[in-house]
Image: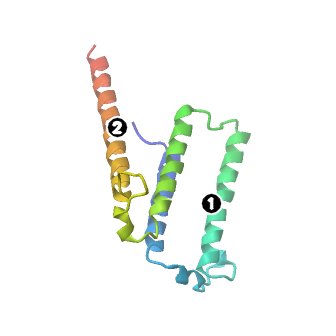
């Protein structure tokens, strides 16, 4: 089934965020004061630009939400809410890993059996495993229904 343009735009936003995170991973807190002439920094440095970019996203997310509301096309589907929750939770996990010393990857929280690395690998493995299984089962059922 072809992807609709809205989903393509959402994926484009996620890819751009990945590119931005890759770029930011090469910076340190000391780089936040680096001056930039970009207009969105509003005569400030990298820190002000990043603050602007986050607020910019928040502002436009609000505008999209308002447009959906006005058009009476709010996100009512359960799948939309579950997908959005997955994105929020994944963002939290990703955020915990950013600018972390790699030596911590093998650290364990008190009373935890798993290291940080093991937690992340667990999430990656089981999400891939579960979604692959669902896709396979749905494909199999569709094939069975078509054969009937």
Q: Can you say which quadrant of the picture contains the N terminus?
A: top left
Residue pictured at 34% horizontal, 28% vertical: 138
Badge 2, how many Cα within 10 Å: few under 14, some, many 20+?
Answer: few
- Coloration mode: rainbow
In this view, 45 is above or below 9:
below
Residue pictured at 44% horizontal, 63% vertical: 97
Give the left or right position of residue 2, taking residue 87 as reference: left
In this view, 9 is above or below 49:
above
Q: Residue furthest bottom?
A: 35
Give the left or right position of residue 42, taking residue 33 as reference: right
Comes first in the chain, label 2 or label 1: 1
Residue pictured at 35% horizontal, 51% vertical: 113
Q: Quadrant of residue 19?
A: bottom left
The answer, for residue 5, to whether it is visible in the render is: no
How far apart, in angstroms, are the residues tagged by discs 2 and 1?
31 Å
Q: Which residue is label 1 attached to?
A: 57
Q: Which residue is label 2 attached to?
A: 130
Question: Where residue 75 sits: x, y (%)?
Answer: 62, 38
Q: Can you say which quadrant of the picture contains the C terminus?
A: top left
The residue nearer to you, when weighing 56 against 124, is: 124
Q: Residue furthest top?
A: 148
Q: Residue furthest right?
A: 70
Question: Where residue 89 sits: x, y (%)?
Answer: 51, 49
Residue pictured at 35% horizontal, 53% vertical: 114
- Under tag 2, what secondary structure? helix
> Foreground mark, 2 or 1?
2
Question: Where residue 37 sits: x, y (%)?
Answer: 62, 84
Question: Where residue 54 sits: x, y (%)?
Answer: 62, 64
């Amino acid at each position: 089934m072809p992807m609709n343009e809205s989903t393509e735009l959402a994926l484009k936003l996620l890819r751009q965020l990945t590119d931005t995170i890759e770029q930011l991973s090469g910076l340190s807190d000391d780089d936040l004061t680096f001056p930039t002439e970009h207009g969105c920094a509003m005569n400030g440095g990298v820190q002000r630009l990043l603050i602007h970019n986050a607020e910019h996203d928040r502002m436009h997310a609000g505008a999209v939400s308002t447009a959906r509301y006005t058009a009476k096309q709010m996100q009512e589907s359960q799948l939309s809410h579950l997908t959005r929750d997955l994105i929020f939770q994944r963002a939290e996990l990703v955020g915990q890993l950013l600018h972390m010393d790699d030596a911590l990857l093998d650290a364990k929280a008190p009373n935890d059996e798993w290291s940080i690395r093991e937690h992340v690998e667990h999430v990656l493995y089981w999400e891939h495993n579960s979604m692959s299984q669902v896709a396979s089962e749905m494909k199999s059922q569709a094939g069975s229904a078509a054969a009937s």
